[in-house]
């Protein structure tokens, strides 16, 4: 057996799983998107581009899509907080491991558990209102019942849960930078800000780019937190929740598939634009 065939033999199980559980379902989803189907009938009716026209022109779908902007804006806060703590804990030695665990712990929790925990936090007269009362801010607030602030509350929950992931990515990238560079910078009189600007930021540029890609895709595909906490009520219905309802409540599999394809193409387009604006260049610090 040749060496090339040996390589393919090792790759065959992974490729089989990838094709079976990723590419085949995606191909089926694209096929469904050009049909009208309730998911139960043995036959499908061709719809052409009708499903895509409805998704792109119906005001209802554009409105639920705009809810993702709350999570998109919150993702920048998430990245900033994660990067700040990653830099601080890189130089801070005391209780560093404790703070690492505290920051990463929320990401380990199941999304359903996070949703129920924050339901008690945000309920009128609940934990958050009690804390605000101690700080002099009295009154009960409809954190999830008021359409004006419900999406801010849910986006804040998302930041709390996913900051740990960005933090670990940044911390690992920063720790991969040779310590000699920091020592040389200190000898030259560079403070922490200069070290961050000229050593850390260029050194972890690829991870920052990856974090923005994850932030974009994550903000567009938010589902579990608003679904569990509000069910999409009070103006918190996201594009994915709407797709879920279209498929499993209204039995419009073709239309829901078209929504999923549009979302996939949008994520790929934004990722491509981001890579063109910030190209993935090799960074040399030494």
Image (cartoon, rainbow, N blue to C red):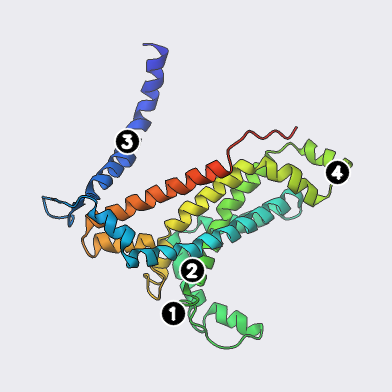
Outermost residue to the left:
42
Does dot 1 land on a helix, a strand or a loop?
A: loop
Task: Name the residue beneath numbered marker 4.
Answer: 186
Residue that badge 1 annotates: 145
Q: How far, Cα to Cα, is label 4 from label 2?
A: 42 Å
Q: How crowded is mark 1: few (under 14 residues within 10 Å), some or many (20 or more)?
A: some
Which of the two discs, 4 and 2, labels the residue nearer the N terminus?
A: 2
Task: From this view, report whether residue 243 is shown above or below residue 44.
Answer: below
Residue hosting label 3: 19
Residue 279 sits above or below residue 112 on the image: above
Q: Quadrant of residue 54?
A: bottom left
Q: Which of marks 1 and 3 is nearer the N terminus?
A: 3
The mark that comes first in sequence, 3 or 4, is 3
Q: Nearer the viewer, residue 269 or 204?
A: 269
162 vs 98, nearest the viewer: 162
State the mark number for residue 154: 2
> Crowdedness of circle 3 by 10 Å Cα count: few (<14), some, many (20+)?
few
* C-alpha separation, residue under disc 1 versus residue under disc 2: 11 Å
Q: Position of residue 24 (x, y in %)?
A: 28, 39
Outermost residue toward the top?
1
- Please name whichever residue, 224 or 61, is drawn nearer the observer in this view of the structure: 61
Q: Which residue is drawn at 32% across and 39% down?
A: 23
Cα separation, mark 3 vs mark 4, equals 51 Å
What secondary structure is found at the residue carrying circle 3? helix
SS class, disc 4: helix
Q: How crowded is mark 4: few (under 14 residues within 10 Å), some or many (20 or more)?
A: some
């Amino acid at each position: 057996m040749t060496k090339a065939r040996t390589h393919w033999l090792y790759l065959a199980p992974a490729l089989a799983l990838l094709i079976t559980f990723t590419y085949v379902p995606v191909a089926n989803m694209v096929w469904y998107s050009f049909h009208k189907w309730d998911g139960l009938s043995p036959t499908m009716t061709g719809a052409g581009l009708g499903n895509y026209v409805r998704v792109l022109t119906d005001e209802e779908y554009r409105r639920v899509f705009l809810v993702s902007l709350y999570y998109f804006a919150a993702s920048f806060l998430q990245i900033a907080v994660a990067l700040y703590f990653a830099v601080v804990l890189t130089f801070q030695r005391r209780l560093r491991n404790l703070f690492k665990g505290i920051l990463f712990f929320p990401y380990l929790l199941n999304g359903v558990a996070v949703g129920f925990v924050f339901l008690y936090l945000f309920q009128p007269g609940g934990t958050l209102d009690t804390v605000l009362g101690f700080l002099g801010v009295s009154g009960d607030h409809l954190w999830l019942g008021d359409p004006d602030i419900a999406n801010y509350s849910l986006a804040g929950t998302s930041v709390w849960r996913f900051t740990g992931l960005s933090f670990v990515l940044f911390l690992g990238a920063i720790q991969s930078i040779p310590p000699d560079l920091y020592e040389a910078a200190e000898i030259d009189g560079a403070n922490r800000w200069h070290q961050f600007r000229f050593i850390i930021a260029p050194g972890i540029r690829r991870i920052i780019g990856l974090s923005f890609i994850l932030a974009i895709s994550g903000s567009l595909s938010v589902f579990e937190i608003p679904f569990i906490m509000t069910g999409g009520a009070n103006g918190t219905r996201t594009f994915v929740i709407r797709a879920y309802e279209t498929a499993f409540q209204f039995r419009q599999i073709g239309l829901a598939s078209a929504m999923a394809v549009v979302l996939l193409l949008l994520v790929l387009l934004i990722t491509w634009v981001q890579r063109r604006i910030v190209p993935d260049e090799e960074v040399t610090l030494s």
